[in-house]
Image (spheres, coloured by chain):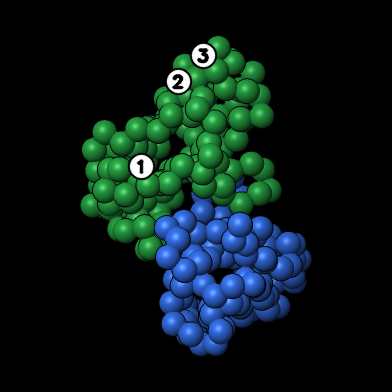
């Protein structure tokens, strides 16, 4: 089946440091979505990327979609304790209705 | 209203019980989803409804039975579950199946 690989699985950073998580697919994605799940919470939609090479920013978060539409990244500048949680990418392959979630990257921020 | 609500929040059931999970959204979304999430794992798709019709069943065992009574409501009927079915069950909705999904808070299910 279609897979979306996500690394790293875990990341500990000191507050104020930057953080990046990466997603990769062996086949072209029609779009990719990013979600954040706080401990004990539910996934919350962050953004959707559709175009090749697209870059979108939300305050300290920068999302990129690769030129070949096979990879994506989420970068957080100057992490804060409120950034703690698990970040999931979810990619859609071709005309499939479903999205395939990556394994998630669990971010811990040390104050 | 930008919320997806789910009831109950917690559910404990025996293997012979029959119970139902409920999900509601009033955002006018035409796609609704059931996911199962185990601890430290990503959400795992179970069912997708598009315009009140079942469009995806991810080979889910028949002891899980979805129902979409109308465009705002989604139910998941549970019968003869196994302990390994214990998980967080998440409902989500989106404008269309290609769009962003909005998740409810989930039902934490424990099967004894």
Residue A89 image position (x, y, % from top left): 57, 65
The answer to whether the residue labelled 3 contacts the one labelled 2, judged by CB atoms less than 8 Å apart, is: yes
| Residue ID at (40%, 37%) | B6
Which hue is chain B drawn in?
green
| Distance from the alpha carbon under mark 3 to that under mark 1 | 25 Å
- The answer to whether residue A63 is above or below residue A108 is below
Specify which label sits upstream in the sequence, 2 or 1.
2
Chain ID, blue in image:
A
Q: Which mark is residue B101?
A: none
Image quarter hosting the C terminus of chain B: top right
- The answer to whether residue B36 is above or below residue A55 is above
Q: Which mark is residue B54?
A: 1
Q: Is residue A43 left or right of residue A18?
A: left
Q: Which mark is residue B19?
A: 2
Q: Chain of mark 2?
A: B
Q: Chain of mark 3?
A: B
Q: Classify mark 3: residues with Cα within 10 Å, few (<14), some (14-19) or many (20+).
A: few
Q: Are marks 3 and 2 on the same chain?
A: yes
Q: Which residue is mark 3?
A: B17
| Distance from the alpha carbon under mark 3 to that under mark 2 | 6 Å
Specify which label sits upstream in the sequence, 3 or 1.
3
The answer to whether the residue labelled 3 contacts the one labelled 1, judged by CB atoms less than 8 Å apart, is: no
| Residue ID at (58%, 15%) | B14
Q: Is residue B104 visible?
A: no
- Where disc 2 sits, the SS reads strand
Q: Chain of mark 1?
A: B
Residue A10 image position (x, y, % from top left): 74, 62
Residue B80 image position (x, y, % from top left): 55, 18
**Who is closer to the viewer here, A45 or A79?**
A45
């Amino acid at each position: 089946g279609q897979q979306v690989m996500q690394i790293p699985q875990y990341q500990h950073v000191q507050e104020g440091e930057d953080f990046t998580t990466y997603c990769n697919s062996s086949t072209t994605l029609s779009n990719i979505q990013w979600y954040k799940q706080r401990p004990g919470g539910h996934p919350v939609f962050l953004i959707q990327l559709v175009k090749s090479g697209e870059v979108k920013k939300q305050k300290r978060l920068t999302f990129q979609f690769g030129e070949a539409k096979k990879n994506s990244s989420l970068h957080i500048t100057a992490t804060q304790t409120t950034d703690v949680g698990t970040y999931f990418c979810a990619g859609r392959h071709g005309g499939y209705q479903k999205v395939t979630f990556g394994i998630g990257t669990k971010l811990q921020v040390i104050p | 209203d930008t919320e997806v609500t789910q009831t109950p929040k917690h559910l404990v059931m025996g293997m012979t019980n029959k119970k139902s999970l409920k999900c509601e959204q009033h955002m006018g979304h035409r796609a609704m989803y059931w996911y199962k999430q185990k601890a430290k794992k990503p959400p795992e798709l179970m069912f997708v409804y598009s315009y009140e019709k079942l469009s995806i069943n991810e080979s889910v065992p028949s002891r899980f039975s979805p129902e979409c009574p109308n465009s705002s409501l989604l139910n998941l009927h549970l019968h003869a579950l196994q302990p390994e079915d214990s998980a967080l069950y998440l409902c989500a909705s989106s404008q269309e199946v290609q769009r962003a999904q909005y998740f409810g808070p989930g039902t934490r299910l424990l099967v004894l």
